[in-house]
Amino acid sequence: MDSLIAAAGRALAAGDPLGALKRVALREDPPALALRGIAMAQLGEHPVARALLRRAGRGFGGHEALAQARCIVAEAEVALAMRDLGGSPRTLAAAVLTLERHGDHANALHARLVAARRLLLIGRLDEAATALAPLGACRLPPSLAAVAELSRAELALRSLHTKEARAALARAHAAAQHAQVPALLAEVAEARVALDRPAARRRSAGAEQMLRIDQVEALLGSGALVVDACRRGLGVGAEWRPLARRPVLFALARALADAWPGDVDREALIASAFRTRHPDETHRARLRVEIGRLRKLVAPLAGIVATARGFALQPSEAREVILLVPPIEGEQASLLALLSDGAAWSTSALSLALGASQRTVQRALAELEAAAHVRAIGRARAQRWLAPPLTGFTTILLLPAALPIA
């Protein structure tokens, strides 16, 4: 390994991509291409970075398996930053084994973090927790420790464990200060600020209140019957009934919770559940069937009683009924929530993260673009979607610092 490659690697580890490029910008050998790719990725030029890393991987060839595996890890993180989540994780898993076999444990740990962050983005929380668990016993370099703690914080927030999230962010802040990587410090700061932003709205007995994430956690543990329009389900404490895959039942539960302690007339229930303005006897018969299904599902938590004009929700043990809704609503709310991280998402990645068809996502994006809430960059398969940028925060990318590549 020559001195310029070593100096470029140290510059990247310190978060100085321009300093790295000054040393290797005119070189075309595989180690220099790999370092140029990582530098371009840190500068936000992800398509260029991916092309350079692929050229480097081909240049190393099969006889330099260690360097090739490092390129695969860097390319996987570029894909993560581009929100290109559709690739197979097997290639990254094979690279991890190669790195461990050659004793490059730092880059192997980084690759495991990339895999865990991908799982978090697509909502596979149990798998992400399993992937993160072994890293707790490892002594990580400061930059990797900060990324690991950020991942643990996100997992805790998604699981509504606010205290654990705050503790993980405090550890991430300490590690990021030790690492002195500007982009990483900015990401930790943004994550800490996000804890104090509104996470949901509470509706109860005609009143509405904005809630932070810690207030949502306290509410869910309060013993009240909560109909949660954020996660699409209802429950009391640890008792939870998911309704994400039963939209008609959830629409009925939401309408009943919104009207509590009053009732909802049959015409309004039919309109909310079946989306029709001209109900007939078949709709009324179907309403009775669906109410019966909902009554059976929530029997341990609440009852549903018929009234003169419709139906009403009656929680067990005189509990309060609370409807929890997102800070903003509509079919595009989930899209805006994903795009608010400041990264560029492909349509396929958004579809994967939301569990919706690409055509549905494309229609919603077109409506948001017309309202100037999102913007597109690139064309055809290279097209990516962004929300308006957050002030003082541009990227969450941190690429492998355990260099050199040689």
Image (cartoon, helix red, strand yellow):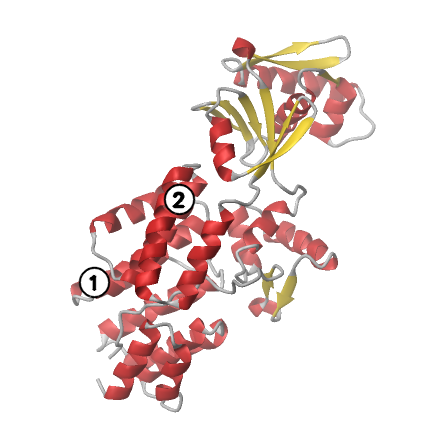
In the image, residue 195 above or below residue 248: below
User: Residue 200: x, y in percent?
Assistant: 58, 37
As rendered, which of 285 and 151 lies closer to the eye? 151
As rendered, which of 395 and 360 lies closer to the eye? 395
Disc 2 versus disc 1: distance between alpha carbons? 28 Å
User: Residue 207: x, y in percent?
Assistant: 68, 27
Identified at 53% across, 18% down, the residue is: 297
In the orientation shown, which residue stands out farthest toward the right?
A: 278
Mark 2: few, some, or many residues within 10 Å (few <14, many ≥20)?
some
Q: Are marks 2 and 1 in contact (CB under 8 Å)?
A: no
Identified at 69% across, 28% down, the residue is: 273
In the image, residue 290 above or below residue 105: above
User: Can see residue 207?
Assistant: yes
Between disc 2 and disc 1, the foreground one is 2
The residue under label 1 is 105
Q: Secondary structure at mark 1?
A: helix
**2 or 1: tag closer to the N-terminus:** 1
As rendered, which of 388 and 107 lies closer to the eye? 388
Give the number of marks. Answer: 2
| Disc number placed over residue 166 in the picture, else none | 2
Say which quarter of the image contains residue 124.
Answer: top left
